[in-house]
Image (cartoon, rainbow, N blue to C red):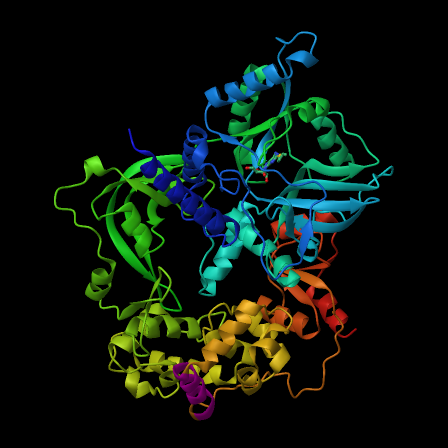
Amino acid sequence: MADLSDIARRVEHLRAEVARHERLYRVEHQPEITDARFDALVRELQELEDAHPELAAPDSPSRTVGDDRLDAFETVRHIRPMASLDNTYSRDELSAFDQRLMRTLADERADPGEPLPYIVEPKIDGLAISLVYEDGRLVRAVTRGNGEEGDNVTANVRTIPTLPDHLDGDGHPDLIEIRGEIYMTLAEFQRVNQEREREGEPKFMNPRNLAAGTIKQLDPRVVARRRLEIVLYSVGAHEGIRFDRQRDVHERFRAWGLPVVEKYWQARGLGEAWAAIEELDRLRSTFAYPTDGAVIKLDRVAWQDIAGSTSKAPRWAISYKFAAEQAETVLRKISIQVGRTGALTPVAELDPVVIAGSTVSRATLHNEDEIARKDIREGDTVIVEKAGEIIPAVVRVVTEKRPAGAAPFDFAARLRELGHDAERVPGQAAWRLKGRNNPDLTRRRIEHFAGRTAMDIDGLGTEIVRQLIDADVVRDIPDLYRLKPDDLLPLEKFAQKSADNLVAAIDASRANDLWRLIHGLGIPHVGAQSAKDLARHFKSLDALMAADTGTLAEVDGIGPVMAESITAFFADPDNEARVRALADEAEVNTRALDADAPDQPQTLDGLTFVITGTLPSLSRDEAKALIESAGGKCTGSVSKKTDYLLAGESAGSKLDKANALGIPVIDEAKLRAMLDG
Ligand code: IVH
């Protein structure tokens, strides 16, 4: 039997761990462990606290709902606190929940043995939100925060296209807190991640983290560019209306035109509830939202009130989480991925294995500390998990199957073997390449510079860049502009014509618009869209470089993180030297092309376009540039917010969608007429 001081130490440790993971999940949106692992930690903590009441503490993370608040947002008090839910993973635990309620309600019912009326709903894997409607009008949207008070994210929530500003019908309550979940579809998650990959920015782990990170953006226009969705399922405070049953909540919401769950089940007793859960598990892959479990709620509100709540969660509702899918496989090798900014990320190369319907051959290992904490070694048999998560993760090692002689993984030594000149970022678990002449970093930097969404230099792809660096004819971006065909001819992949073409393509890029150069520099956090926002605002590279963080943060589309990143970038002497060499020696254009032109009439101001199909004379990029120069906006997918679909030949699903939504469809000729006003 462990003595009390051991137990106290364990409790202490668990509290710190739970608080840390809670923060990673709720504030940083970068969880390191799965929900199931997290729940297991909380449960162990709870059990120890129950068994040793002398160790219990009112502020233990086992009793609170955590906190998601950030300083940048206004804090708002919920009218009725937002509780969390107790999670279960087994039918036995559900049965205990049912038994408890039967006992609590015994005196209320003529036949205390009769099965209880439940509602079974999907448990949506998003982030909780509370909407305040007054007289049918949306006035506020608040995150859960610490359960008592949350962040005011109204402006961001208003960008959600499916959320009505006014409730349909009449007879609205004077006031109601409507609660639900904000989420992102898998398709939108993949679209955003593809875009980030193209722009060399780190990808998000899963739709939930992306949705949570998006709702905490300071600029609602960034939020509007990533399509968020919402689904509503419960009420907080309400005045001037009554709900007798949970079922009424769903039906009222539906009548008001609010997005509601696709399906819910009425069940009498636990047996029927269990059948509903099984059906939900079969159906959930067809739902629009990520569903990671079921929520079982007592249907009668009067009985809910009698059952009451704990400090953290109601006693009349519980969630049942579906087990994440796991599989066992062998980790062959740990490879190191090099990011655009020099970040070095470890990746597990696995024997391919099918999990949750797809083949997995790589999994994230997060960072050096995670590998050490889980003691993951090459050759180990590991458990890989793919939950709601899209990027699979290594959960643990099956140590019994460890091959003799497998050595602990030495991250620093591996980096040396690979020839990476790297350092660990002070205060972080991350490593990054160091030094201005690091060939890996130079390669990534040039690839990005030449990429389609940056300087768009034809013929300067990955292979050619590698060759130029290996042959030492290029050491940094400005060297590109000194290349002559004769420098290229000795290289393997070049003949006279291809050498001439590449030099001509590089030369042509000198005349590019300013935003391409800004994006091409590879400033961390600055993607193509932000580069356009910056170019539009500052009109010259000099003006951008002279701006301080405060000025930058005030530019439309630029938040504080990006502003910091931009000033830090130009403050670095290597970066400054590179930019100077490009501007002064290589004579690359550093002004916005429209900077000197008389202001073009903003005939499309405030209009949002989607472009699809092949246009008669314009490429899509050209059409986009025309629209933007007249003050319009282009987005990738058709929604209620789209004003016009510009369609050319062989338009496909976007055209169908526009027709279905009644969005006007125009051709190139009509666009030109609109441009001319
Ligand atoms: S009811 C007092 N219903 O899951 C009742 N919550 O893990 C509280 N959630 O805090 C919420 N789907 O953010 C409810 N159908 C559903 C839900 C749901 C997802 C969230 C909610 C809750 C968390 C608990």
What is the span of residues highlighted in magenta in the rendered image? 573-584
Q: Quadrant of residue 277?
A: top right
Name the magenta segment's main secondary structure.
Answer: helix
> Which corner quadrant holds the C terminus?
bottom right
- Percent of width and height locating residue 195: 50, 60
- Taking 85 as reference, is 450 left or right? left
Is residue 648 something one can see in this rendering?
no
- Taking 248 as reference, is 409 left or right? left
Residue under the point 29% across and 74% down: 439
Please say if 358 is above or below 655.
above
In the picture as drawn, the residue positioned furthest to the bottom comes out as: 585
> Which corner quadrant holds the N terminus?
top left
Nearest the eye: 352 or 570: 570
Residue 355 is inside the magenta segment: no
Which of the four quarters of the rendered structure image does ligand 1 lie in?
top right
Please say if 587 is above or below 415.
below
Please say if 417 is above or below 675.
above
Q: How many marks?
A: 0
- Percent of width and height locating residue 484: 34, 88
- Percent of width and height locating residue 485: 33, 86
- Taking 153 as reference, is 95 left or right? left
- Taking 667 as reference, is 583 left or right? left
Q: Quadrant of residue 54?
A: top left
Residue under the point 26% across and 53% down: 334
Is residue 28 something one can see in this rendering?
yes
Residue under the point 38% across and 82% down: 574
Nearest the eye: 460 or 500: 460
Nearest the eye: 465 or 50: 50
